[in-house]
């Protein structure tokens, strides 16, 4: 890892999957400057007095790995925070809740019988861990933001913040049978998954390769069930950007006091 002085001056990357999720953060960005690299737009600037790079991971694990690698190699980021949406998979994970990831696995990775199901070959690992300190700040920021949003904007009744395992895979999970099967298969291998999305495990693996701390928060847009295809776009348009902005503002504020 770089010395502490480098850490303070290196920009923090704030990654989102979709433009709608990034929108609220773009509005806050001070002294914005766009750099196009690897067919992506990277927005450099300041948020709450801190140097940041805003970027879209795009959708899926390969795209997210490319964006993450570019952020580290080209823009010198030494911390990454991901804000996005996910499908709720765990029992009790409702639309409007927030999940802060502790770790990730790939639900569609299966090199059995050569390696155990879900294990990333040649890493000897199935689960890739988020940075505990950054995740603790993100959790605190998420709790405060959710409480505030629900007070002022009448959000989701009883919405709460969870912390735990998230599964990533290159498919949009949109059926109750499929999501039940996924959850049960992973549970039988000892992995109790809270939510499903399409990028986090790739970001986690690249960050581990480079030794870059990262944290991820996902707002639950749907239940990965038969109405996911309707719930997802409605949520992304109406809520995701507002939540991402409220959480990241608080997160950066907490980080600046460290
Ligand atoms: N992101 C948000 N909802 C999702 C779902 N149902 N499947 C995969 N990724 C998602």
Image (cartoon, rainbow, N blue to C red):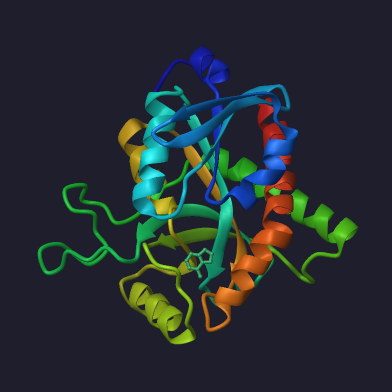
In this rendering, position of residue 160 left or right of residue 210: right
Single out the residue that lies furthest toward the right: 152
- Nearer to me, 142 or 73: 73
Q: Position of residue 38 (x, y in %)?
A: 39, 33
Q: Quadrant of the C terminus?
A: top right
The count of marks equals 0
Residue at screen point 52% across, 50% down = 17
User: Is there any visible trace of residue 144 in the rendered image?
Assistant: yes
Location of residue 119 (image quadrant): bottom left
User: Is there any visible trace of residue 204 in the rendered image?
Assistant: no
Q: Position of residue 79 (x, y in %)?
A: 50, 31
Please tell me whether residue 175 is drawn above or below residue 160 in the rendered image: below
Q: Position of residue 188 (x, y in %)?
A: 33, 77
Single out the residue that lies furthest toward the bottom: 177
Please tell me whether residue 206 is drawn above or below residue 31 in the rendered image: below
Residue at screen point 38% across, 74% down = 187
Residue at screen point 44% across, 22% down = 76
Please tell me whether residue 32 is drawn above or below residue 112 in the rendered image: above
Q: Position of residue 138 (x, y in %)?
A: 62, 44
- Nearer to me, 153 or 141: 153
- Nearer to me, 73 or 144: 73
Single out the residue that lies furthest toward the left: 114
In this rendering, position of residue 106 left or right of residue 29: left
Residue at screen point 71% across, 52% down = 243
- Nearer to me, 258 or 18: 18
Q: Quadrant of the N terminus?
A: top left
């Amino acid at each position: 890892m770089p010395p502490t002085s480098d850490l303070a001056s290196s920009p923090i990357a704030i990654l989102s999957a979709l433009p709608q999720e990034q929108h609220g953060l773009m509005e806050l960005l001070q002294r914005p400057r766009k750099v196009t690299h690897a067919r992506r737009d990277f927005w450099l600037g300041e948020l709450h007095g801190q140097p940041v790079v805003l970027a879209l991971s795009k959708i899926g694990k390969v795209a997210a790995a490319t964006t993450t690698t570019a952020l580290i190699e080209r823009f010198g980021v030494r911390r990454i925070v991901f804000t996005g949406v996910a499908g709720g998979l765990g029992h009790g994970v409702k639309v409007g809740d927030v999940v802060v990831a502790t770790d990730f696995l790939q639900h569609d990775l299966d090199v059995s019988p050569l390696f155990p199901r879900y294990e990333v070959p040649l890493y000897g690992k199935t689960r890739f861990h988020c940075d505990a300190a950054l995740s603790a700040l993100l959790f605190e920021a998420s709790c405060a933001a959710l409480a505030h949003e629900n007070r002022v904007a009448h959000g989701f009744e009883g919405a709460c913040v969870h912390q735990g395992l998230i599964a990533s895979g290159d498919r949009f999970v949109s059926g109750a049978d499929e999501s039940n099967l996924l959850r049960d298969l992973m549970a039988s291998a000892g992995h109790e998954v809270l939510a499903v999305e399409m990028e986090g495990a790739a970001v986690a693996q690249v960050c581990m390769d480079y030794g870059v701390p990262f944290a991820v928060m996902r707002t639950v847009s749907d239940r990965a069930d038969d109405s996911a295809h309707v719930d997802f776009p409605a949520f992304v348009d109406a809520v995701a950007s507002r939540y991402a902005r409220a959480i990241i503002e608080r997160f950066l504020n907490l980080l600046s006091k460290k």
